[in-house]
Amino acid sequence: MQPAMLDAAILEKLISAAVAAPSIHNTQPWRYRLNPDTVTLEVRAAPERALRYTDPMGRALSVSAGAAVFNLRVAVAHFGWDPVVQLLPYRSQPDLLATVRLAAAPADRTGRHDGHDDLYDVIWRRHSSRSPYSARRLPARVLCDLTEAARANGATLWLADPQETAWLLRLTAEAERRVSGDPRRLAESRTWIRDTGPYGIPPDALGPRDATGRLPMRDYLGPQPDGRWGDDRPAAPFEPHPTIAVLTTAQDRRTDWLRAGQALEHVLLLATSHAVRASLLHQALEWSDLRWSLSDDHPAPGHVQMLIRLGYGPVGPATPRNGAAEALDRHR
């Protein structure tokens, strides 16, 4: 397939794939433009959906956008092009996070698409699952595949041992405790719990609370002014020995955040293809001192970009997404 054959129907599928990527609080903090002269898709930040208090530096926004870039790569390859990615291509346009040019695929790669083609149908099956997982452990071959997926995107993925897992969960619990006492962050979090609309997280997608208090899943609602907890989700026992994978990058620049997002989405899509569920423990990364503790004290060098809980369990409800037409900015 040549770039000149791009039509409205395929463009809609490309943007729909990008929009299906995970994002913090399902804010979907991106918009897309097509440059028809170069047949290039631009991935731009949507600052009106940024999290001012939770993500003041825009790191989580960049990780989210990186996940969308990976989905674009998969979709572009699926339709026969070679996705040529540039991260932060113009210093004069800080909102332009990445470009993906639809180039003619080399003859020796026709039909292979960098191994991503098999993941195209998985894009719409990937959902965060915030439910309890079973005690079944992930096979070594699956963990190896996930590790290689991260490495292929310029990141490192390693599995925390039981002692490290307990420490990671303690830091996550401390982050949760801090949010409950921070009115601005708590109000911002509550804003994104929504029954209707294309953004945010529906209440039924939050999953239960851990009855044992061992696994600090994110509580978006927090305590009410009268001391009651706004979270009326049912409690359920979670797995006693959770599998936590740590995603790191060697450096901690905006380009590294975007690479981390691509690595994250590659890992999540591959996990989904193996029927492995995932949820993200991002809370400790939202406090600078806790994040530095994560990066300074873990056994592998690098900067922690995400904690990923992996296991076997329910698929989990899907969160809504904006339509491709709304996400595509047609003004240049």
Image (cartoon, rainbow, N blue to C red):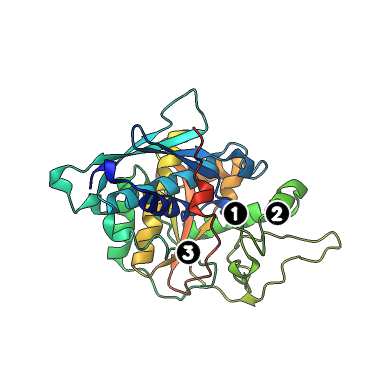
Residue 190 visible, this angle = yes
The quadrant where residue 143 appears: bottom left
Amino acid, disc 3: His
Residue 294 is left or right of residue 70, and the answer is: right
Q: Residue at x 40, y 58 (%)?
A: 268
Q: Residues within 10 Å of mark 2 (few under 14, many from 20)?
A: some
Report which residue position mark 2 lands on: 191
Q: Position of residue 123 (x, y in %)?
A: 40, 60
Q: Are marks 1 and 3 in contact (CB under 8 Å)?
A: no
Among numbered discs 3 and 2, the one appearing first in the sequence: 3
Q: Position of residue 172 (x, y in %)?
A: 59, 55
Among numbered discs 1 and 3, the one appearing first in the sequence: 1
Residue 234 is left or right of residue 298, and the answer is: right
Frontmost residue, 116 versus 19: 19
Amino acid, disc 2: Thr
Frontmost residue, 165 versus 26: 26
Is disc 2 placed on a helix, strand or loop? helix
Frontmost residue, 230 versus 311: 230
Q: Residue at x 77, y 61 (%)?
A: 223
Residue 83 is left or right of residue 318, and the answer is: left
Is disc 1 placed on a helix, strand or loop? helix
Report which residue position mark 1 lands on: 25
Q: Residue at x 23, y 48 (%)?
A: 1
Q: Position of residue 236 (x, y in %)?
A: 60, 77
Q: Which mark is residue 127?
A: 3
Residue 252 visible, this angle = no
- Judge whether 43 appears above or below 202 on screen: above
Amino acid, disc 1: His
Is disc 3 placed on a helix, strand or loop? loop
Query: Cα distance, mark 1 to mark 3?
Result: 13 Å
